[in-house]
Amino acid sequence: MIIPAVTKVLVSGGGVAGIAAAISASMTGAQVTLAERSGTLAQNRCLLPSLLSGAATQAEMRLADPCDLSERFGIEVRLGEHIVSVDSASGCARTRRGCLTFDSIVLATGSVSLPDDLKGASKHGVAVMRSVDDYLGLSEALGGVSHLALIGTLPVSLLLAQAIAGRCRVSVFLGSGTLPQFTRRVLGRVSEAASPRGVRLFFEPVDSIVGVRRAEAVVAAGAVHPCDGVAIVPRTAPSLPSVGCARGGNGGALVDESLRTSCRGVFAAGDCAELRCGSGSLPSRLHSSSIAMGEAAGVNAAGGTAKASVSRCIALELFGVELCEAGLDVRGARRLGLDAVEFESHFGEGELETSLVYDRVTRRLYGVRVAGRGALSLSGYASLAVSSGARLDDLAYQESPCLSRLGCRRSPISLTAGWAIGRSRGGVFGEPQGPDL
């Protein structure tokens, strides 16, 4: 009897995607080695804002224990093993210590913070939020700060502001005056709810940080905003070893729904990967996306046939305003060459707002946005609808969760889909078409 050879899977990166890939590959029957460049496995970065509010501790941020991975799943964990290049043809990954061989490899090397070229960023009183130590340092420094200027992208900047609110006044600079209409309107609701807690939102980019010896103000759109501390959430970029695979528009390894790159036997998942979409590609730098991508990549690297169902879904409550988003907004869809249109609806006298982004002809769903009371209860439904490639016609006649407190017999997403179909047939918004309401 011939015993089939065991597939040797190498996973590069000990973050959430890498750990998910290693466990999935091992459970599929592969011999797995996980190589992590640092001396410890990565931490759960989505909990970083919670360090400031005390809702999470450093111990709770740990993703996995190397000994546990070894004992429970038979994974060989090699800490301090930095993979610098990958040769898919020979099945060899060169490290700073030598060489690791593989039958297939999963790149899960995450992202790195880009240097900030903002004028005045090197002044005293300015914290750049890159690591756990930076968050802990800011938490300690807040005792001596009365007004903090927070510079960064959505949604992390707002999560940080929410965690800090009550300890000092916060001015959040989101850095864009061209946000999509739906997003701008929702942020207006968040801004109104945040104001009583001493948090203000500004939609201008910061030009510089000024002060004599330390940060005393930020300048945005020609206006001076006094502060006695600044926190910057830096932009990030994919981090990859030297490998000959095709790259996406943001520099990540370009992958299909099976997480395969253009190189034979090379897969990628998490922050370092970009999913093909339309005529372009999309990064998916979310904890939930990284888990789904990592698990599918691990199964496929071990010889399986999994497909990642990724919707890039976020579910948040910001200053009492519930919000869930999945997939693309209409501008993002059009940038990818998709023939996308948007339809919006309102429920409960404007309490709940829903936006669906879909293909003009096929009515395939590309994105869902829901904001207001009850939005969080719809996050799973929104994620599944987008990731499964559902059409408006599927959603309009599909059994779906209802929100009885809003007076809806079915989900606002399902109802909105029916009304969007009605518009495409010449109906008028507010006069539901298609499903029997």
Image (spheres, helix red, strand yellow):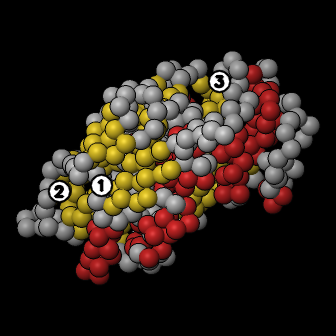
Q: Write down the residue under mark 2.
A: 121
User: Element under label 2?
Assistant: loop
Q: Residues within 10 Å of mark 2 (few under 14, many from 20)?
A: some
Separation of marks 1 and 2 at Cα, in angstroms: 33 Å
| Outermost residue to the right | 436
Residue name at image x 19 percent, y 68 percent: 125
Where is residue 11 shown, x and y percent of the image? 43, 48
Residue name at image x 33 percent, y 61 percent: 79
State the quadrant of the C terminus: top right
Q: Is residue 138 left or right of residue 282?
A: left
Separation of marks 3 and 1 at Cα, in angstroms: 45 Å
Separation of marks 2 and 3 at Cα, in angstroms: 43 Å
Identified by mark 2, the residue type is: Ala
Q: Which mark is first along the chain, 3 or 2?
A: 2
Say the numbered circle drawn on residue 81: 1
In the displayed structure, 359 sits above or below 239; it is above
In the displayed structure, 322 sits above or below 85; it is below
Mark 1 or 2: in front is 1
| Outermost residue to the bottom | 143
Mark 3 or 1: in front is 1
Identified by mark 3, the residue type is: Asp
State the quadrant of the N terminus: top right
Q: Write down the residue under mark 3.
A: 359
User: Element under label 3?
Assistant: strand
Identified by mark 1, the residue type is: Glu
Q: Is residue 347 left or right of residue 233?
A: right
